[in-house]
Amino acid sequence: MEDLNHPLNEEEIEQLDQFLLNRIDDHLITEEMDEGIFDISTLDGFLTAVVSGPVTIPPSVWLDSVWGDFEPEWDNEEDFSEVLALLIRHMNGIVQTLMEYPEDFEPLYLERILDDRSYIIVDEWCEGYLRGTQLSSEQWQTGGEEIATLLNPILSFTAVTDWKGHDHTDDEVETIQKTIAPNAREIHAYWLTRRDDLPQEELITNHDQPPVGRNDPCPCGSGKKYKKCCLH
């Protein structure tokens, strides 16, 4: 039996990234459809939120959010089991780091090389994290201003804030980006001590709900609309 607690190596991370990217036919019309998650950075952010939040989200729920409207057509059970094992192992790797070595936790960002300089791209990771919070948005709101403040830099690099995190100088953007990892660690620690206080039978939101709109209440608990939240 495969050890599901063994973190993915670089080759397996690339394998999972390619699977997510290639599962949707380029010729399909996906307008107004939920494409789900199609890169490893978005998945990493998504699973970080799933394992860090106020409630326990079972794979039967978060897998639907990974696929969106495009669940893969599996040739056989072995193919499904192989991909599921990669997903579970990556999730467990995040859990292990946050629980045992929190200071070692680092988001899996994308990188871009421009003029011989490497730049990190945090947007996909942050969008994934936001997607993870939407699976139990009502419970996230119970975190109030403390969680809202910790989520600010993450949500500032997502569409719901019109990517306000980029409306700064390069140095300021870099400073905001550097707060994402420690804030993610703090969010995990915050909910870890409170998770048992929440009624488990109410944890799972309907995963068929449409994504939270810009005029809906922000799941961070600030009480503001999405478009008015965070760095606005």
Image: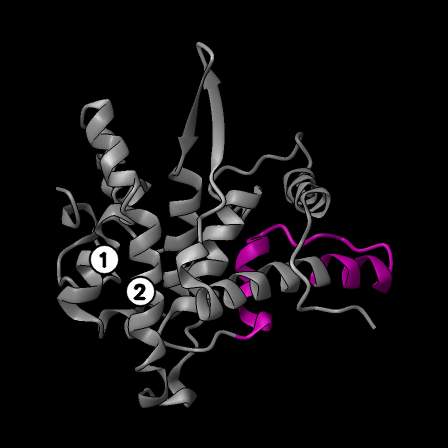
Q: Which label number is shown at residue 150?
A: 1
Q: State whether residue 55 is above or below residue 91.
A: below
Quadrant assignment, res 197: bottom left
Residue at left offset 13%, top offset 65% = 145
Q: Which label number is shown at residue 187?
A: 2
Identify the main secondary structure in magenta: helix
Question: Type of residue at label 1?
Answer: Leu
- Tag 2, which secondary structure? helix
Quadrant assignment, res 225: bottom left
Q: Is residue 31 left or right of residue 10?
A: left
Please state the extent of the stretch shown in magenta in the rendering: 58-84
In front of the other: 83 or 188: 188
Residue 111 in the magenta stretch? The answer is no
**Residue 87 appears at what percent x and percent y?**
64, 59
Residue at left offset 13%, top offset 57% = 224
Quadrant assignment, res 91: bottom right
**Residue 188 appears at what percent x and percent y?**
36, 67
**Residue 167 appears at what percent x and percent y?**
19, 28
Disc 1 to disc 2: CB gap under 8 Å: yes
**Could you tell me if residue 192 is visible in this image?**
yes
- The residue carrying pointer 2 sits among few (fewer than 14), some (14 to 19) or many (20 or more) residues within 10 Å by Cα, namely many
Question: Type of residue at label 2?
Answer: Ile
In front of the other: 160 or 113: 113
